[in-house]
Image: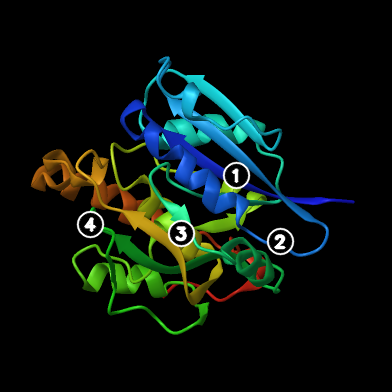
Amino acid sequence: MTRVITVITAVHAPAAEHLPAAYKSLTEQELPNGWEWQWVVQEDGETETVAPHVPDDERVSFGQGRAGRAAMARTMGLSRARGEYVKVLDADDMLTPGTLARDIEALASDGIGWTTSRVLDLLPDGTTVGFDQDPPTGPIEIGAVFDHWKAHDYRAQVHPATLCMRRDLLFALGGWMALPASEDTGLLLALNAVSRGWFHGETGLLYRKWPGQVTGQAAHVHPEEREARMAVVEARARALAALPGWRFGGAGAHR
């Protein structure tokens, strides 16, 4: 029987032109025997701009809905997800060869509920820049992301745009947080509160930097909003960590 990994992409109209590059990065993935990928593309809105950029491929499922930002679009897209694992891919980013195979291999390990990987920023001139504080390849213990995030001005040591996770764990945690931004950081910390993860030292994502990028807008770093977002993200992670017996795979508790 064929097993499926679902790649889920939220897209709004300004980023639609980047979908073909994201699709190309998917077609270049080589999966283990017996596996296939499904690409769920969900427009954050109902325009006529996005659909022309969606590939005509039976492995691609496209949907639209009321605009509500990325978290809502991804959640609506989950209604069509068939995979036992769910991988995030933003519309303007690209996977590197081998990424999905590495995620599948790591998630086959006992007690690993989610994975992340090294990221390279892809600049407008085509050059790339890496992060100089990546953790070593291997398991990430419960609470480790939270501790680093708190100690480094709300910056995690692993990138939530590279998350791949078990579908049942994603649903149990309620998915992405209903925030105007940092919704993926909220999910990362929730996953880390209840499950061990895995970090791949190989580059798994090219993170495109471009003028229309949502995280590049001034509102994303507005001090009052940012503090409010981080307060809710922290509260959720702490609440999950404190729930007795709420651990995936029987891993140890968050300190």
Q: Residues within 10 Å of mark 4 (few under 14, many from 20)?
A: few
| Relative vertical location of residue 238 with respect to residue 137 in this rendering, above or below | above
Q: Which residue is mark 1?
A: 171
Residue 125 is labelled as 4
C-alpha gap between disc 4 and disc 2 = 31 Å
- Disc 2 is placed on an element classified as loop
| Relative vertical location of residue 198 with respect to residue 87 in this rendering, above or below | below
Residue 4 falls left or right of residue 40: right
Looking at the image, which is closer to me, 142 or 85? Answer: 85
Residue 162 is labelled as 3
- Disc 3 is placed on an element classified as helix
C-alpha gap between disc 2 and disc 1 = 24 Å
Q: Name the kind of residue labelled 4 in the image.
A: Asp
- Disc 1 is placed on an element classified as helix
Q: Name the kind of residue labelled 1 in the image.
A: Phe
> Which residue, as the protein is rendered here, is positioned at the far bottom?
136
Q: Residues within 10 Å of mark 3 (few under 14, many from 20)?
A: many
State whether residue 81 appears in this view. Answer: yes
